[in-house]
Structures are given as C-alpha cells and as structure tokens.
C-alpha cells in the first residue's frame, strides 16, 4: 500500500473524479435525515452537500481513500482505509490514502468539526466508512454482472475482482468503474458479517512506518516553501507580562535578520536562517512589566488549589444521600490526593509554516485541529474560508497539545505582517514554558463501609482548573467541566450513595487537553482509594473490586483477565509486590497489574512488569491496540514516577528535560497486553492505557512497603518521606 503525497481540495477531487474515464467516486454526507451516499456527478449537481468521506476507484485498479484525521502515531492512516477496503472487498495492495485539507467537507460526522482527539477517529468514522465501502462493492458487482452477462446472484466481489462464481470469469474493479459510476449509489448496502472480514480484526502493518523509518516522512518541522524565512518569538517569562522596552535596532543589526515584529503573543524576529533569528532575539534585551502574579510559584499554586477544597462545590452527580450515610457510618475512610501540572513534551516541538498574500493563505501545520486553524486564519487574514488552505503534516506527537492553534496563529500573523512565507520554530525551552498544561488536581474523598466490608457511601470533591471553560465554554453544564469529573460521575462501582462535587479553580497557568484528560488524574485517585477501602475492609484488592462490579461484566472481565495473566494470587518474586487497577475511559475498559520493587535505602521504585487487559469492543487492527496500550502505559508510568512542572517568579521554572525528567528506555518495564474481544460497541484506544498505570504502581508500592502514596510523582524523595512518616 502506498501513500499519495498530494492533498486534494473538494473541487480538485471532483474535477479529477468527473474527468473522462476517471472511475467510480463515492462520498458520504451527513444530512439532517442521516447519512447519505453520493456519486461525484450528484455532488457536482448540488454543491450544498458537504461530504466527509471520499472513495475513488480508478481504471488502473487503484483505490484512493481521503483520510480526514491527523496521523500522530495512533495509526489512523492504516485503520480508516482498512475499514473501507474490507467492505469494498479490495485488494489491499491497490489501496492508497491522501490527507484531507481543512474544509467543511471533512468535518467529523459526530462532532461537526474537523479535528482529531478524544480517541474518537475510528469510533466516529466507522459506520460511514463501512457503508461507503459496501456501496462501492455492490455497485461494482452490479456492473460486473452486466459486463459478464451473468445473473447478479451468481456474481461476487473477491479481492478487487468481480467474478461469475459458476464459470470463474472475472473483471477487475478498474475495468468496471465506468459502468459502475453510472449506477445509483445504494443507501443501505449490505454490510459484511463478523466472519466475513478479511482485514478488520487482523494485524496489519502500519503504513507510516516505512516513511518514518527511512526519513521520508514529512513532519511540520520539515516544511519548506519557496522564499521562506524563519521566525522565532520572544515571549513574556511571566504570565500576563507586557514589553516595556525593546531594543529592536540591535536585533536588526544582526546579519540575516529581516524584520522585528510586535504581536499579541510577544515579539517576533524574522531572519534568513534559524540561527540568525535566535541571535537577533538574544539582543532584544526586553524589559517586561505588568505580570499577572509575579509571586506565583509551585508552592503558592499548590496552596491555592488545596485551600479551595474547603469551599462548597457544584454537584456533578448525586445518588442517594451520601452525606447522611457518612454521618451514620461506623467505619469511614478518608484521604486527600494531589496531582501536579504536567507538560506534553511532544517529540517534535511546536512549529508551523505559513504564507499569506492578498489572494490566499497556506498553512503547513502538524495540527490536531484543522478546522480551528482554518477558522483562526480566516479571522486573522480577513480572507474567505475558500482562500485558506491548511496542509496537515505528520505530527511528532500530539497528546492534545496540537489541538491548540497558538503556534499556527503566530505563523499566520508573522507571515501576514512580513509579507513573505515564514516558518515559526519553537525551542524545547519555549515548548516547556509556553504549554497548555494538564491541570493540577486536589481531591478529597470520604467513604463508608458496613460491617461486611461493602461500600455504603462515597463523597468525592475535586478542586481543579477548567479546560472546557476556555476551549469549549458552550459545553460547560451548570458550571461543571465534565473533563474534570470524568471517571467519578460515571463510576461503575456499586455505591448506593454517591456525591461528586467540583470546585473550579481559576489560576494564571493555562490548561489544556493532555492524553486521557481528566481520567489521567481521576483514574489514579479513584483506584488508589479503592485499594485503601479494600485494605480497610480486610479484603483482597481484586476480590474487593469484583464484588463492587457485579452489574458490569466488561469491567469484571478485564480485571479477571489481567489478574489471571499476571498470576494474581501467586507469591511474587523475591523483593517484589503487585498492585492492580482498572479504569473505564473513552468507551474502553483497561485493567493493569504492576509488579514492582522498592529500594528502601534510596526510595527508588522499579517497575518490572505491567500486565494489561483491554476491552475496546470490536477491534480493527490488534497491532494498533497493543501499540497504543504500550504507549499509554509508558506515558502513564512516566507521569506517575517522574513528571512535574515547576513554577517560580510568576512563570514556568521548568525549561528542558534536565529538570523535567521522563521515563528512560532502560526504565521501561516488560509490558504484556491482552486484548479481550467482544461484540460491544467500539471504544477509543489512543488514551485509555494511561489512567490505570499510576494507581497500579502506587497500589503495588503499598503492598511492598505498607505506605500509601497519595501525591504524584512518586519520586524517590517522596517515597523516603512517606516511609519515614
């Protein structure tokens, strides 16, 4: 399978599709009445239709799928074409994909915007892609029946060929596309049954690996345009600060510097080379003023959030009467948990190239949010939407950071002012100090147990900054950020009296989506606390969980699978202990068992093995599922053991990997992933591997030392302090 480099506008695609002998084109359109499948001719007749899937089969037998989602390592440029190819009964060797431009035609059919996130790509596109592929198959079979002069019931599609099954005669798809394109597009084609899939459910090689391993893959940072200059930004070191004095002339004297431009985010230096731009920035000698909170530091932030936990919270969920049940309880368990601000630390720092003229704007961006970038550019340039072109490159890591449009906005504004194409490149230090961080979290939980060890009440209060208040304010319901309380409001443990409260904390530190969002901290907190309840009840942590999940067979199944594969109940290796955790997020159930040891002299936690069971419903590509679990576990362990953004002097103190430690390859444990398959609806897979990792380790540390770690990261210093305490 080959990747076509070209990106198509809708008009270009239609023009090519309608050309003489072009072949068979099918587009999917979401209308108020539901999904509608159209041919290229129908689209040309009514341009009001805005399709979000294109499939074209050419006379040379090639099959082109337009992928509207961003490829950031999660494998959508393999899994989405797999779905169409299977229903189409295509020859996989003939399938290609092209990246969709930013346009209404490629909006997500569920979200109504063109973006990639929330572990939704396959879930949201699955039905549409299957129907488009199945419609193409039925049209080709009908055309083949006519061409072969054989009864329709005796014809079938097999690996890119329509055959008369009785005589064995056949014609390839390419030879049938002209006649097929003249047929009406079936609106309710017959979809394959489970046992008929030839690609779906099978391990298929990732299509982006050859390009990435040979250096041919084009990421945003690899972008070059004719006449392009480089731009770097001088941004305020303190939140809200403004420039009081700038030595622009000194920067302009640097050889190669072409312009110094003031903008809303800081001061840009535009130069012939990146080195010249950096040198120009170094001599600006900016004096900053009017910082929002010049005394802001890690300690004050933590105190501010902790202090808010005593305030009345907004009720996110209330079941029964938790307060009354707690007041009447004879046995209560209370705990408080903290999680820090985290950076995204993507492998590829933020960057974007842009060219702005009076007639058009071109943006080359490694973005998760094509629609947002396009909308921003329309506003910034004053051009019409059809004059703005967003070219999505490969993303060197997204994790939610590249849903933001700040780096693209910088490039567009600078290019517009400079009057020439520019590429904005951030350094790693800029990346760390100008992030939209995972929110810090302070949580207080109280629960009651009866004399049989059953949970009778659970009160859960979260103090946390809001992501949705800034990004999607319209999705705030009754003042509650659903991301902040996810995992609590949909708690599957059987608790008759449950109260979940949210206290919104507004601080100068900007927050944004971070892989698995609220589940990343709530998973740690909930599963750590459940372990505390199990200990208080005198029960095995696995059996305690299973007892609370009698109404949730999928949750039980992943827990039992992970435990069985890890050998739960057997005596662990000498010096080691095990911990277990599970979490439901993005429609997917994940359970993990961690095998750890703790050096009592140094406080160092060593994770030897993670056994993972995952149930994401139907599986498209099991290799991708396993890879995303491994990736999520590693990221979860890194956050659990090492990561924390530090603040000082009104801004971010953390500057680079020297003071933002990440899990090393040598520290990565053995990871054993087991996929629990079923016929349940599709779940997401890019993010759910993260949440159970931290609590599984924390629970194993308790089993090893008797010490509860209620704050992240679980550094050696934190472990030693807890053991002394």
Image: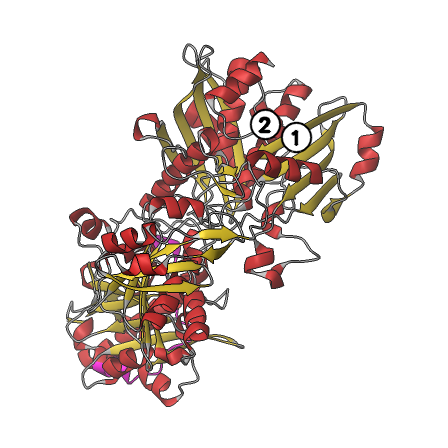
Q: Quadrant of the N terminus?
A: bottom left
Q: How many marks?
A: 2
Q: Position of residue 116 (x, y in %)?
A: 42, 58
**Residue 342, above or below 718:** below
First of labels 2, 1 by sequence position: 1
Left-right relation of 67 to 725 = left
Which of the two residues, 75 or 196, is positioned nearer the viewer here?
75
Answer above or below: position of 528 versus 356: above
Boundaries of the magenta span: 178-195
Q: Which residue is mark 2?
A: 710
Q: Residue at x 58, y 24 (%)?
A: 541
Q: Is residue 231 visible?
A: no
Magenta span includes 464: no
Provide residue 589's location: percent of width, then percent of height.
50, 41
Label 2 CA crowd tier, 10 Å (few <14, some 14–19, many 20+): many
**Residue 614 left/right relative to 622:** right
Residue 13 quadrant: bottom left
What residue is at 84 percent from the left and 36 percent from the top? Answer: 324
Q: Is residue 183 magenta?
A: yes
Q: Main secondary structure of the magenta part?
A: loop
| Label 1 packing within 10 angstroms: few (<14), some (14-19), many (20+) | some
- Residue where numbered disc 1 is placed: 336
Q: Please state which of residues 521 and 330 is positioned toward the viewer in this rendering.
A: 521
Rendering colour mode: secondary structure
189 or 406, which is in the foreground?
Answer: 406
* Picture coordinates of residue 354, whole percent (x, y): 31, 67
Q: Nearer the viewer, residue 643 or 134?
A: 643
116 lies left or right of 580: left
The answer to whether residue 1 is above or below residue 46 is above
Q: Quadrant of the C terminus?
A: top right
């Amino acid at each position: 399978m080959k990747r076509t480099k070209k990106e198509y506008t809708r008009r270009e695609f239609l023009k090519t599709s309608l050309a003489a002998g072009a072949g068979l084109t099918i587009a999917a359109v979401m209308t108020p009445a539901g999904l509608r499948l159209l041919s290229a001719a129908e689209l040309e007749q009514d341009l009001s239709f805005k399709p979000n899937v294109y499939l074209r089969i050419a006379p040379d037998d090639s099959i082109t799928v337009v992928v509207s989602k961003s490829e950031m390592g999660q494998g959508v440029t393999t899994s989405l074409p797999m779905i169409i190819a299977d229903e189409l009964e295509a020859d996989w060797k003939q399938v290609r994909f092209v990246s969709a431009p930013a346009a209404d035609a490629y909006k997500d059919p569920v979200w109504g915007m063109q973006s990639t996130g929330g572990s939704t790509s396959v879930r949201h596109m699955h039905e549409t892609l299957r129907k488009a592929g199945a419609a193409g198959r039925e049209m080709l079979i009908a055309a083949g029946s006519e061409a072969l002069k054989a009864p329709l019931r005796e014809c079938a599609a097999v690996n890119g060929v329509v055959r008369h099954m009785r005589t064995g005669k056949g014609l390839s798809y390419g030879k049938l596309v002209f006649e097929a394109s003249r047929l009406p597009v079936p609106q309710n084609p017959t979809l394959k049954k489970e046992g008929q899939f030839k690609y779906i459910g099978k391990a298929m090689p990732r299509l982006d690996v050859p390009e990435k391993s040979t250096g041919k893959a084009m990421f945003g940072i690899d972008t070059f345009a004719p006449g392009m200059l480089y731009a770097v930004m001088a941004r305020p070191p303190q939140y809200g600060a403004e420039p009081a004095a700038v030595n622009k002339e000194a920067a302009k004297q640097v050889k190669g510097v072409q312009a110094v431009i003031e903008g809303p985010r800081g001061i840009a230096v535009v130069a012939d080379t990146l080195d010249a731009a950096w040198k120009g920035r170094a001599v600006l000698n900016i004096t900053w003023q009017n910082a929002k909170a010049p005394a802001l530091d890690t300690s004050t932030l933590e105190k501010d959030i902790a202090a808010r936990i005593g305030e009345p919270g907004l009720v996110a969920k209330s079941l029964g009467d938790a307060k009354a049940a707690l007041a009447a309880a004879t046995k209560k368990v209370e705990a408080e948990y903290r999680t820090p601000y985290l950076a995204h630390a993507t492998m590829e720092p933020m960057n974007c190239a842009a060219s702005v003229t009076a007639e058009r704007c071109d943006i080359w961006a490694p973005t998760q949010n094509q629609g947002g970038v396009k909308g921003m550019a329309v506003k910034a340039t004053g051009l019409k939407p059809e004059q703005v072109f967003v070219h999505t490159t490969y993303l060197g890591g997204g994790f939610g950071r590249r849903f933001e449009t700040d780096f693209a906005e910088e490039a567009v504004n600078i290019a517009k002012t400079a009057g020439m194409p520019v590429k904005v490149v951030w350094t790693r230090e800029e990346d760390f100090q100008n992030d939209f961080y995972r929110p810090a979290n302070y949580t207080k939980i109280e629960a009651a147990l009866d004399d049989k060890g059953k949970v009778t009440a659970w009160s859960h209060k979260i103090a946390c900054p809001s992501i949705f208040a800034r990004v999607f304010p319209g999705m705030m319901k009754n003042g509650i950020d659903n991301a902040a309380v996810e995992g609590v409001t949909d708690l599957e443990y059987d608790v008759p009296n449950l109260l979940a409260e949210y206290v919104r904390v507004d601080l100068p530190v900007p927050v944004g989506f971070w892989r698995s969002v609220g589940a990343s901290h709530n998973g740690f907190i909930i599963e750590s606390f459940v372990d505390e309840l199990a200990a208080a009840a005198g029960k095995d942590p696995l059996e305690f969980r299973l007892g609370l999940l009698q109404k949730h067979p999928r949750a039980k199944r992943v827990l039992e699978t992970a435990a069985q594969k890890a050998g739960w109940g057997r005596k662990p290796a000498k010096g080691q202990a095990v911990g277990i955790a599970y979490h439901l997020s993005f429609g997917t159930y994940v359970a993990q068992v961690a095998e750890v040891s703790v050096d009592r002299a140094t406080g160092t936690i060593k994770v030897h093995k993670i056994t993972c069971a995952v149930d994401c419903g139907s599986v498209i590509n099991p290799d991708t599922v396993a890879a995303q679990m491994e990736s999520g576990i590693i990221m979860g362990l890194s956050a659990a053991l090492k990561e924390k953004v530090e603040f000082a002097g009104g801004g971010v103190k953390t500057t680079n990997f020297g003071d933002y430690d990440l899990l090393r390859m040598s520290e990565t444990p053995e990871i054993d992933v087991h996929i629990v398959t079923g016929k349940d609806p599709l779940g997401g897979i890019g993010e759910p591997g993260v949440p159970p990792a931290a609590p599984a380790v924390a629970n194993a540390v308790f089993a090893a030392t008797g010490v509860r770690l209620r704050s992240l990261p679980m550094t050696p210093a934190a472990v030693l302090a807890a053991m002394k305490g």
